[in-house]
Image: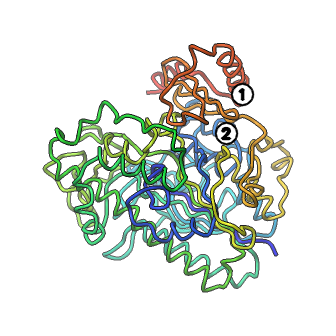
Amino acid sequence: MRPNILLILCDDLGFSDIGCYGGEIDTPNLDALAASGVRFTQMYNCARCCPSRASLLTGLYPHQAGIGHMVRDLGHPSYQGYLNDRCMTIAEVLSGAGYETRMSGKWHVGGHYSVFDHEKEYPGRRDFPRPLDRGFGRFYGTLAGAGSYFNPHSLMRDGEPIRPEGEDYYYTDAVSDAAAEMIEGSAASGKPFFLFVSYTAPHWPLHAFAEDIERYRDRYRSGWNRLRMERFERLRSAGLIERRWELSPRDEKAPPWESAPEKEWEALRMAVYAAQVDRMDQGIGRILQAVRRRGILDNTLIMFLSDNGGCAELLQEDAGYDFVLATTRRGEPVRIGNDPSVQPGPADTFMSYDLPWANVSNAPFRLYKHWVHEGGIATPFIVHWPERIRESGFTHGAAHFIDVMPTCLEAAGAQYPGDREGRPLRGLEGESLLPALQNGGWTRSAPLMWEHEGNRAVRWDRWKLVCRYPGDWELYDMRTDRTELHDLAPKDESRVARMQDMHRGWAERCGVVPWDEMLRRMKRSG
């Protein structure tokens, strides 16, 4: 019998945030999936939200799918800002193979939606494709990349724009509940389902209910120094990282906790972030309950991952963001920015948790979302499928978002087509991960590649070549130094040259444009 497939993606979650990956945040539902499933220790995303989503949904690198940067059209096919016609989504292929296809949550691969002009963009033009235009039979969620949890813009149900309903509306809950309803509703068709649950949590803004925040109010008063070390020790004890790896130093831009100003406010910001993750896990619990009520848990392939590492972005009071509505649903003005005189969490605030806490989220690694060092691209990845996973544990081979689509297709017994309406398709870049679920000894056959905003990397076997734009290439032995602290490039120039050639060939094949040129294009376009 073909399995149901439940793909759960969260937004801006760091490698060590959830409990089963060393975190102190309460995530009992994800922890339970991990306890009877497989945890990948080296799963990689594409360092940023919409490129990662494009890669996840298509099995291609983001440039090949048309989203080499973000969702604005930058005048080049690889950077058009929406999924192109040379790719197929998982939903398109599986719907053709007899699956019910559903999506609940954030889309963000179909053009840019601001709070000012999104209404005129709703009709689903070619350059603003919606989920229903790319293979999903049902959709509840947002088309934009970020916004208020209490008053999200670009909200849709199927093909119609809608507004939040109910006094206690909270977007994470709405995504979870819509997903659970889709599972319940799929029973009548008798077909297997593919459900993509795409949370914005815990992406900024820091929005959460008071009762969720309260549970974490005291948890972060010990500060980021201690929290990073505690996570590091739990990761080592659990076997998720090697004991010989060192903890990366605290980011030099993060002050020692002892000298940090506004400690109470700082601890509260992280408490709100934790509350957002906690609320998402509660929703995942309700989704799993819907699966259990239908008696289909054993034959449901469940995957959970994050679209990039923790986010160090600073929200400024005077930036003029086009994704922030000026008022709440009650008409209160929204206060934008990380102001210590304002308590984070309520609907009339719009804050982020900032670099020092993102440094905790990404422990033991360094750097963040945007960059392709491990802190920006390492994600937790949990796979649960009782009918195929006989023994829980870890898989240590390097995997990537491009591998999810081939995995889904092999599980479903579906074939990737050669063309889309007569136009040849690019072949899938990824490899099925199903063998890794059997014995944990999976090894990929091709190198992995990255490019985002000039940040570049190659992962081939135990070696990683990585460049933080506009700096030099660095070389690390991932077997002995995955926290990327000991650069071997000066000692192994021949290996650096070979891996540079690999990246250069990949970039040419995938339509990657040098970032200096893209910056000039962006400047000319305003």
Image quadrant in which you'd find residue 305: bottom right
207 to 526, vertically: above or below? below
93 to 236, vertically: above or below? below
Q: What percent of the width, then of the height, locates residue 209?
A: 29, 68
Res. 49 visible in picture: yes
For image coordinates 68% across by 36% down, the residue present is 448
For image coordinates 57% across by 34% down, the residue present is 480
Disc 1: which residue: 506
Res. 194 visible in picture: no
Q: How many marks?
A: 2
- Badge 2, how many Cα within 10 Å: few under 14, some, many 20+? many
Is the residue under label 1 in contact with that under label 2 (CB below 8 Å)? yes
- Relative to 154, 446 lies left or right: right
Q: Which quadrant does the C terminus fall into?
A: top left
Name the colour scheme.
Answer: rainbow
Q: What percent of the width, then of the height, locates residue 437?
A: 72, 60
Q: Which quadrant does the N terminus fall into?
A: bottom right
Disc 2: which residue: 61
Q: What percent of the width, then of the height, locates residue 227?
A: 33, 50
Kindly state the secondary structure of the residue where label 2 is placed.
loop
- Relative to 522, 194 lies left or right: right
- The residue nearer to you, when weighing 213 against 230, is 230
Image quadrant in which you'd find residue 517: top right
- Badge 1, how many Cα within 10 Å: few under 14, some, many 20+? some
For image coordinates 47% across by 22% down, the residue present is 524
- Relative to 499, 75 lies left or right: left
Amino acid carrying mark 2 in the image: Tyr
Q: What percent of the width, then of the height, locates residue 51?
A: 57, 42
401 to 476, vertically: above or below? below
Q: CA distance from mark 2 to mark 1?
A: 10 Å
Amino acid carrying mark 1 in the image: Trp
Dot 2 or dot 1, earlier in sequence:
2
